């Protein structure tokens, strides 16, 4: 095994170009488990830990360029206002120790359907900045997840950052696990209200082979909010519409039974989370939300 | 590149410590003794403390003396079994089966053996003697698999190499050909007429008496006329219950080091619960006399029953003897799930009857425990489940049958609560249902039927010590209830950490319903059924620096419970000294028995007390011989009771100091080694289960308060209160710690802990801390504890074994609370979110 | 094989012949003679290997040894000068927060970090900060007591006396 330690981003891209099989190592919170238990024996590790720009974010007008290696702790502490959904998601990641190491780049690179960041990124409408020695391309998050633990990166590409529009409305995130901390999602749900475009976006985790959006639910709810002029009036989402939205979110899942939960439970729970997060986000939009302590 | 060779061309990994430039070498294993000194603080500043210091010898019995190994444990210096290092040591590693039931057609180790850096690869054929099996009760477990695999993860080969990664890689190169066999997974498949026998040609002493060779042991308990009693019942409830497979999940993985000795023997440093039981099983396999296998207890990172069986002991010794080098073995967490037995999963069928006025008429029960592929301690677990299967209640008519199966599931054996846990879960659910049927308050119904001193158990044994069952229930019930809606902070904000789901932000109060539940249980203390349950202690008293100091040497496994603290306390109380050294536990002293069955404070504590008494007699004889003639006040005869040893002095009844211990001892040391036994027990009758099978009982009651998100099926335990009778709180701080720790393990199996075995393949699906979940600090509530001290006159200081009882009633109390919140029946533990939301 | 240089508990250290897949935890325990950080799960699920890496508590089992090159690491062995106990260490002993002790080193590093950031934590803050550290023996109650006690004692001490 070889341990490649590029000192800077260009060097990392060159190394990845030369050795496309080199496995990027950032926070180590996924990969090191595989190494410790002999599940994976890559020829080369590509340590991205000393590349400073990966651990920074820039806010430029309407969007945030979030370095792939910014630890979740810093996202939940520093980006609550700009990326509230992702900040909430970050707070649900594993444990304080893991949140100090792991970042969004690793979640995207691993592309596990259970990655905590995915539903928030889907709901916010992020773009993944994939870079190789050949150049940079922006992959819309909707096109990024190809299958369980498969993503749209080319072998020579590395994730430099995600670009996310600064929140223009309330965002929520909730995750179900069978323990009150340090747990992998049985299912998770992200929701973002986008008043500027009068749209609603969602993201569902751990309830399909990849993270998915509930597009039909989004369109349905968008239509209702438009029709009922809710965006302008700030009136309550009609309960029947909220319920139908939740049902459509549940229907967007294609979960499996596994050791963490049953398919039927996941579907049901996604519906509950959809209804609740919509309620919280809409309340906030109406300007009467209660502050939430402890949750980012 | 295969990955194991160095990219720069050197061959394989080399021993890292053999090269220069490596810093931080540590010496060969030295397991230090611990000195118990009286810590500076009394009651903790800024903290409420319910225990005042008492009169008598400072730091003695009844005080919250601090752990003598505490400082080593907080500085990182305490040498756990995985921390040992030795020059030129090798790393041992086991290859385990990837299937649950198969014939082994061939094992080819040639490639592994040829790997650079590999020093030995052993299979069954390399075992040095004809003794190739081991086991606590039945020697049915192969050291390395021979011809057949009976469960997932069974050891097949052992590898020793320079680096753990080399060993792992080499093991992966061993080629094993299997021919899979049909799986035995439950009672139906185990006892089917054409069932494959898990063990053919059984010769163990239970074999002639079992209904089927795939039944390890069966114990009926029959008392009174159940038919007649059932006819008198105004209300009858029947229920089927299921209890999942729980893992001890001690944090310190199985590990240790074997060091070959010049005399052909081996020194083994290991984490275990019972050194001498290990020794008895190890030595014959190695072909060594027991005195050539010298065992020392290394630091133990928790046990809870999971270290009662052997894990890596024999393999490490075999590799060390084969290679002539020290061998260290450390299971990783994945392997740990295969490296020890688990709590038996169980199916339980109960029928309870009661009259209109709330008196139990009868109980019928059938308890089927899945023992898995090897016997371990299944027979004793069966005995407990049967004899304690009715709970702490008076019932005149009882029919209980408990049995353990052989299957292809993971082997099950000892875990805290040992057979009494599964039964308590079921009978307490039954008691709630029956109370509801009768129309009585659930606690009152229990109290009406509660056992007391003098009650007769279903085994016919009279409970001859206090049994404050009703009082324990009263105490937990009277505690103030925790506040409702604790997530509301008063400012309109919500603290999700106080809600079901916690930081996962699943609820801001929506769907949350509170429930309260109660349960009580009974656990036996000590080894039962006629087992010769004894311990050995060696106590030495000598003068050093003008002060008498005591040292205590036992083979008791300190696994975290605080036995070392208690031994020092006993020595202080009995000998009136302040300085006590606790010698490391090893096999140079007689057996202490197991650190299990809540027995060590009772039995090894009893042995230390007895040894101290003998030392005291000798010291007083010595004192009388030295000073009897010259100093007034020395009684004429040997060691009269009116003399006290206090503050390093011999004190007469009137308070006169007769001599200091140091001046009596002079240059002489007084040393006594003695064995001590509790009252004998007898086996249960094979057909009726009658017999005085148990030594002592321990009782605890819980009240659980939960908030359940009924839409998502997520549970937050808000408070888990416990009342327990400990007879005598030898160390109040430690006993509360035991109660809280035991309660939490009960919480775990109520809500999240279960080893899941795939029914189609027999493979364990969640052997990791990612998917086998134990409670975090955010899952664990405040746990108020009420400690009762009603002395058992048969036991040293009146104490009662305390470690296990809280694990019993915690689970059913939580289940009862969840039932109360959800209105669901919930016949299974652990209860999962889908059980609370389906339908 | 590679060489890794890092600072551990204030001392410059180096380890040779480190396999590229080795964790910082392995290097500390098996190469640098610092076995205080514990190896309970090696998958980031228990916190018993918690160390400070450049000031921040992390699971040493999930840090590749090579990633620690040039870093500052503080382990349980570095919480107090030799022969002394830090306030948090003392409190764990005094409050009965130690049973088997396997989780203790990781909890101490996590608790120490908490009290540095938040000298007067509420109970919920303590629970959140320690939610990545499993303990199987105590049920956490005495650990809560210990952290409360340490917080109280640290607040009572003059700044300079703090170990």
Image (tube, rainbow, N blue to C red):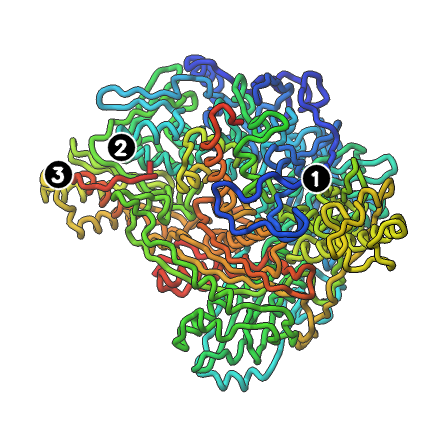
Q: B92 left or right of A189?
A: right
Residue B525 makes an appearance in the image: yes
Which one is nearer the viewer's eye here, C98 or B87? C98
Residue B78, numbered circle: none
**Figure quadrant of residue B66:** top right
Q: Are marks 3 and 1 on the same chain?
A: no
The quarter in which the N terminus of chain B is drawn is: top right
Q: Residue at x 43, y 70 (%)?
A: B442
- Nearer the observer: mark 2 or 3; the answer is 3
Q: Position of residue B513 (x, y in %)?
A: 33, 57
- Nearer the observer: mark 3 or 1; the answer is 1
Q: How many marks?
A: 3
Q: Are marks 2 and 1 on the same chain?
A: no
Tell me the subunit letter for badge 1.
Answer: B
Which residue is the site of mark 2? A124
Which residue is the site of mark 3? A231
Q: Residue at x 37, y 60 (%)?
A: B515
Question: Badge 3: few (under 14), some or many (20 or more) residues near its Cα, within 10 Å?
Answer: many
* Secondary structure found at label 2: helix
Which one is nearer the viewer's eye here, B385 or B188? B385
Which one is nearer the viewer's eye here, A6 or A283? A283
How far apart are labels 2 and 1 at the CA level? Answer: 58 Å
Earlier in the chain: of badge 2 and badge 3, it is 2
* Secondary structure found at label 1: strand
* Secondary structure found at label 3: helix
Q: Position of residue A225 (x, y in %)?
A: 14, 42
Residue A264 makes an appearance in the image: no
The quarter in which the C terminus of chain B is drawn is: bottom left
Which residue is the site of mark 1? B34
């Amino acid at each position: 095994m070889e341990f490649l330690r590029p000192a800077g981003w260009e060097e990392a891209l060159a190394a990845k170009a030369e050795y496309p099989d080199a496995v990027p190592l950032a926070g180590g919170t996924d990969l090191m488990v595989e190494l410790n238990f002999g599940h994976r024996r890559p020829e080369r590790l590509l340590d991205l830990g000393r590349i400073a720009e990966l651990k920074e974010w820039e806010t430029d007008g309407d969007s945030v360029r979030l370095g792939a290696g910014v630890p979740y702790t810093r996202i939940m502490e520093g980006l609550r206002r700009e990326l509230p959904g992702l900040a909430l998601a970050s707070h649900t990641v594993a444990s304080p120790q893991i949140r100090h190491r792991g970042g969004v780049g690793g979640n995207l690179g691993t592309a596990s359907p259970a990655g905590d960041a995915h539903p928030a990124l889907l709901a916010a409408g992020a773009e993944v900045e994939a870079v190789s020695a050949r150049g940079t391309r922006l992959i819309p998050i909707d096109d990024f997840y190809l299958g369980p633990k498969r993503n749209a990166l080319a072998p020579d590409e590395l994730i430099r950052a995600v670009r996310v529009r600064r929140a223009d409305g309330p965002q929520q995130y909730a995750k179900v696990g069978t323990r009150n901390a340090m747990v992998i999602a049985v299912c998770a749900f992200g929701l973002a209200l986008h008043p500027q475009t009068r749209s609603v976006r969602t993201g569902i985790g751990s309830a399909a082979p990849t993270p998915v959006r509930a597009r039909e639910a989004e369109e349905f709810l968008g239509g209702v909010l438009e029709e009922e002029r809710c965006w302008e009036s700030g009136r309550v989402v009609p309960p029947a519409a909220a319920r139908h939205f939740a049902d459509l979110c549940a229907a967007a899942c294609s979960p499996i039974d596994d050791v963490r939960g049953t398919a039927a439970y996941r579907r049901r729970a996604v519906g509950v989370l959809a209804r609740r997060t919509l309620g919280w986000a809409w309340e906030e939009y109406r300007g009467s939300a209660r502050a939430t302590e402890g949750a980012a | 590149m295969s990955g194991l060779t160095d990219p720069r061309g050197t061959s394989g990994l080399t021993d890292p410590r053999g090269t220069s430039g490596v810093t931080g070498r540590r010496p060969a294993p030295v397991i230090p003794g611990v000195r118990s000194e009286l810590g500076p603080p009394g009651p903790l500043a800024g903290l409420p403390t319910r225990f005042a210091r008492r009169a008598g010898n400072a730091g003695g019995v009844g005080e919250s003396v601090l752990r003598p190994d505490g400082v080593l444990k907080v500085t990182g210096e305490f040498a756990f079994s995985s921390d040992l290092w030795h020059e030129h040591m090798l790393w041992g590693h086991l290859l385990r089966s990837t299937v649950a039931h198969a014939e082994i057609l061939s094992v080819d180790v040639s490639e592994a053996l040829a790997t650079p850096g590999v020093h030995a690869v052993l299979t069954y054929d390399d075992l040095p003697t004809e003794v190739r099996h081991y086991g606590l009760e039945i020697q049915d477990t192969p050291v390395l698999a021979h011809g057949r695999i009976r469960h997932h993860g069974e050891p097949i080969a052992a590898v020793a190499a320079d680096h753990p990664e080399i060993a792992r890689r080499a093991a992966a190169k061993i080629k094993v050909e299997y021919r899979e066999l049909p799986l035995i997974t439950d009672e139906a498949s185990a006892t089917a007429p054409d069932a494959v026998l898990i063990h053919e040609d059984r010769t163990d002493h239970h074999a002639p008496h079992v209904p089927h060779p795939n039944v390890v042991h069966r114990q009926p308990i029959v008392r009174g006329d159940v038919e007649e009693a059932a006819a008198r019942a105004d209300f009858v409830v029947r229920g089927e219950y299921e209890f999942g497979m729980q893992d001890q999940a001690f944090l310190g993985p199985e590990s240790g080091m074997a060091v070959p000795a010049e005399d052909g023997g081996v020194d083994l440093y290991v984490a275990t619960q019972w050194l001498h039981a290990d020794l008895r099983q190890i030595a014959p396999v190695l072909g060594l006399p027991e005195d050539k296998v010298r065992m020392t207890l290394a630091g133990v990172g928790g046990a809870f029953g999971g270290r009662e069986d052997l894990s890596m002991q024999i393999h490490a010794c075999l590799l060390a003897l084969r290679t002539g080098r020290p061998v260290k073995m450390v299971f990783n967490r994945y392997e740990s799930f295969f490296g020890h037995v688990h709590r038996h999963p169980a199916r339980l069928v109960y029928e309870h009857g009661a009259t209109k006025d709330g008196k139990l008429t009868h109980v019928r029960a059938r308890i089927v425990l899945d023992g898995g592929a090897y016997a371990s301690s299944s027979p004793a677990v069966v005995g407990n489940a049967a004899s304690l299967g009715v709970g702490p209640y008076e019932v005149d008519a009882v029919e209980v049958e408990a049995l353990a199966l052989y299957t292809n599931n993971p082997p099950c054996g000892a875990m805290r609560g040992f057979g009494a846990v599964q039964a308590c879960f079921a009978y307490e659910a039954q008691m709630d249902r029956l109370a509801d049927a009768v129309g009585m308050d659930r606690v009152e119904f229990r109290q009406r039927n509660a056992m007391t001193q003098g009650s007769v158990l279903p085994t016919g044994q009279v409970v001859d010590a206090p049994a404050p069952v009703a009082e324990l229930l009263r105490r937990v019930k009277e505690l103030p209830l925790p506040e409702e809606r604790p997530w509301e902070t008063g400012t309109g904000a919500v603290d999700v950490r106080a809600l079901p789901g916690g930081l996962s932000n699943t609820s801001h109060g929506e769907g949350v319903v509170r429930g309260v539940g109660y349960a009580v249980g009974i656990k036996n203390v000590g080894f039962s059924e006629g087992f010769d349950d004894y311990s050995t202690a060696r106590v030495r008293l000598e003068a050093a620096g003008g002060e008498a100091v005591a040292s205590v040497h036992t083979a008791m496994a300190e696994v975290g419970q605080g036995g070392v603290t208690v031994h020092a306390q006993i020595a202080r109380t009995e000998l009136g000294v302040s300085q006590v050294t606790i010698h490391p536990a090893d096999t140079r002293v007689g057996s202490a028995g197991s650190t299990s069955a809540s027995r060590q404070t009772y039995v090894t504590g009893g042995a230390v007390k007895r040894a101290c008494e003998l030392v005291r007699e000798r010291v007083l004889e010595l004192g009388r011989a030295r000073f009897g003639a010259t100093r007034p006040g020395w009684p004429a005869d040997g060691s009269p009771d009116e003399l006290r040893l206090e503050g390093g002095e011999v004190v007469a009844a009137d308070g006169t100091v007769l001599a200091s211990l140091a001046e009596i001892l002079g240059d002489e040391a007084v040393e006594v080694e003695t064995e001590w036994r509790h009252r004998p027990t007898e086996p249960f009758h094979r057909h009726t289960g009658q017999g005085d099978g148990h030594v002592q009982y321990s009782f605890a009651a819980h009240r659980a308060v939960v908030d359940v998100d009924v839409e998502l099926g997520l549970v937050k335990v808000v408070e888990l209160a416990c009342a327990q009778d400990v007879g005598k709180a030898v160390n109040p701080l430690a006993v509360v710690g035991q109660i809280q720790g035991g309660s939490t393990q009960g919480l775990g199996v109520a809500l999240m802990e279960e080893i899941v075995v795939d029914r189609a393949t027999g493979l364990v699906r969640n052997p990791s801390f990612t998917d086998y979940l134990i409670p975090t600090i955010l899952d664990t509530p405040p746990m108020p504890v009420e400690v009762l001290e009603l002395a058992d006159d048969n036991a040293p200081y009146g104490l009662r074994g305390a470690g296990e009882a809280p694990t019993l009633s915690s689970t059913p109390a939580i289940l009862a609370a969840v039932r109360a919140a959800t209105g669901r029946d919930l016949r299974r533990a652990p209860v999962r979110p889908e059980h609370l939301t389906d339908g | 094989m590679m060489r890794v240089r890092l600072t551990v508990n204030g001392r410059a250290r180096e380890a040779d012949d480190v396999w590229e897949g080795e964790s910082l935890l392995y290097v500390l325990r098996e190469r640098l003679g610092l076995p205080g950080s514990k190896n309970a799960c090696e998958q980031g699920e228990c916190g018993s290997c918690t160390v400070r890496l450049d000031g921040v508590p992390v699971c040493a089992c999930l840090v590749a040894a090579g990633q620690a090159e040039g870093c500052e690491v503080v382990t349980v062995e570095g919480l107090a000068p030799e022969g002394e106990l830090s306030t948090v260490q003392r409190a764990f002993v005094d409050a009965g927060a130690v049973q088997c002790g396997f989780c203790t080193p990781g909890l101490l590093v996590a608790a120490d970090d908490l009290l540095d950031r938040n000298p007067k934590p509420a109970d919920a803050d303590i629970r959140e900060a320690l939610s990545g550290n499993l303990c199987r023996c105590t049920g956490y109650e005495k650990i809560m007591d210990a952290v409360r006690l340490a917080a109280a004692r640290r607040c009572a001490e003059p700044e300079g006396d703090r170990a």
